[in-house]
Image: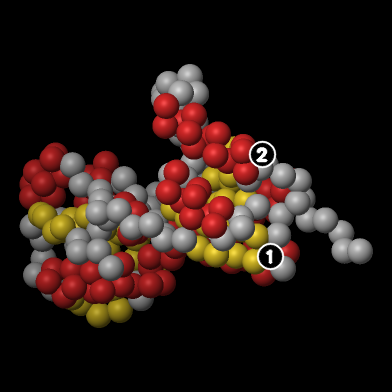
């Protein structure tokens, strides 16, 4: 009889790879909801919505791995309404929920930023925080100069999501910085690096003025669209390591 693979063993391995204790995050990383003891089927997805949970249960999931989990800083504590429905569904089905946020953005192999660079063919030269091995954002070079139209077209093709371009900068983009998700607040940091363009997921009203006044191109390429890489890579690595069945379920959203 083969040895049972426990959820604790799976989480311990993911923690060893990602080192979540090294990050000051906005939510707990690792095992957020404990389900059954054994794991045979792992489902990954970007956000632990009720729709993802239901889709994962249809695939026979024993555990769900996400980038956006629960229990965010400053959110209300009572387990009511939407939160109650999500947790109730997991607990009724005895399914575990694993979530990794910033550690999954920054990881040099599984990270969302590394995954975006690989998909786009960008050459990584370092982090947006030089000298910090756990820098969330990255910087580097395009393989060849591109116009804003060309870069927007490539982003749309690779991500399946049309980016929004704002700002002013060089006609040809060569140096670039990027940070997936809701990193529009890092736009000034990117401009200080002297890059031609910054790519992230979301945009806010001040981003337009900042990009114009600092002379940098900004591409908001979609929060969900830019953060599909990490959970897929980590989920597949866990599946390969433990001989698990793994399914990535993509539930796109328009932002």
Whether 75 is drawn above or below 31: the answer is above
Is residue 137 left or right of 190 when viewed as pictured? right
Is residue 130 left or right of 20 when viewed as pictured? left
Q: Is residue 136 visible?
A: yes
Residue 9 percent coordinates (x, y): 75, 50
Marks 1 and 2 sit apart, C-alpha to C-alpha, by 18 Å
Rendered image: mark on residue 228 = none
Whether 86 is drawn above or below 158: the answer is above
Of label 1 and label 2, which has the lower sequence position?
A: 2
Disc 2 marks which residue?
Answer: 34
Q: Quadrant of residue 49?
A: top left
At horizontal 65% and vertical 66% (from top left) the residue drawn is: 245
Front-most of residues 69 and 59:
59
Residue 146 percent coordinates (x, y): 18, 75
Q: Quadrant of residue 221?
A: bottom left
Residue sticking out furthest to the right:
1
Q: Secondary structure at mark 1?
A: loop
At horizontal 42% and vertical 27% (from top left) the residue drawn is: 81
Q: Secondary structure at mark 2?
A: loop
- State the count of labels: 2
Crowding around mark 2 (Cα neighbors within 10 Å: few <14, some 14 to 19, many 20+) is some
Residue sticking out furthest to the bottom:
144
Front-most of residues 75 and 206:
75
Crowding around mark 1 (Cα neighbors within 10 Å: few <14, some 14 to 19, many 20+) is some
Disc 1 marks which residue?
Answer: 244
Whether 112 is drawn above or below 189: the answer is below
Q: Is residue 179 visible?
A: no
The quarter in which the N terminus is drawn is: bottom right
The type of colouring in the image is: secondary structure
At horizontal 83% and vertical 56% (from top left) the residue drawn is: 4
Q: Are marks 1 and 2 in contact (CB under 8 Å)?
A: no
Is residue 9 left or right of 21 when viewed as pictured? right
């Amino acid at each position: 009889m083969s040895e049972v693979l426990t959820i604790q063993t799976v989480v311990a391995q993911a923690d060893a790879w990602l080192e979540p204790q090294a990050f000051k995050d906005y939510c707990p990383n690792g095992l957020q909801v404990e389900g059954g003891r054994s794991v045979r089927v792992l489902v990954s997805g970007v956000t632990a919505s009720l729709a993802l949970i239901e889709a994962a249960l249809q695939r026979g999931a024993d555990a769900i791995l996400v980038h956006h989990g629960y229990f965010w800083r400053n959110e209300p504590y009572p387990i009511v309404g939407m939160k109650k429905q999500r947790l109730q569904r997991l607990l009724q089905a005895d399914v575990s929920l694993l979530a990794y946020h910033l550690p999954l953005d920054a990881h040099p192999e599984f990270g969302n930023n590394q995954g975006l660079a690989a998909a786009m063919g960008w050459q990584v030269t370092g982090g947006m925080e030089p000298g910090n091995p756990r820098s969330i954002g990255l910087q580097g070079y395009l393989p060849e100069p591109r116009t804003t139209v060309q870069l927007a077209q490539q982003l749309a093709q690779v991500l399946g999501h049309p980016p929004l371009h704002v700002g002013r900068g060089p006609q040809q983009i060569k140096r670039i910085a990027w940070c997936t998700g809701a990193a529009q607040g890092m736009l000034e940091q990117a401009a200080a690096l002297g890059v031609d363009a910054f790519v992230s997921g979301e945009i806010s009203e001040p981003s337009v003025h900042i990009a114009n006044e600092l002379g940098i191109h900004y591409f908001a390429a979609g929060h969900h669209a830019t953060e599909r890489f990490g959970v897929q890579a980590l989920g597949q690595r866990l599946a390969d390591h433990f001989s698990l069945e793994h399914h990535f379920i993509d539930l796109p959203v328009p932002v």
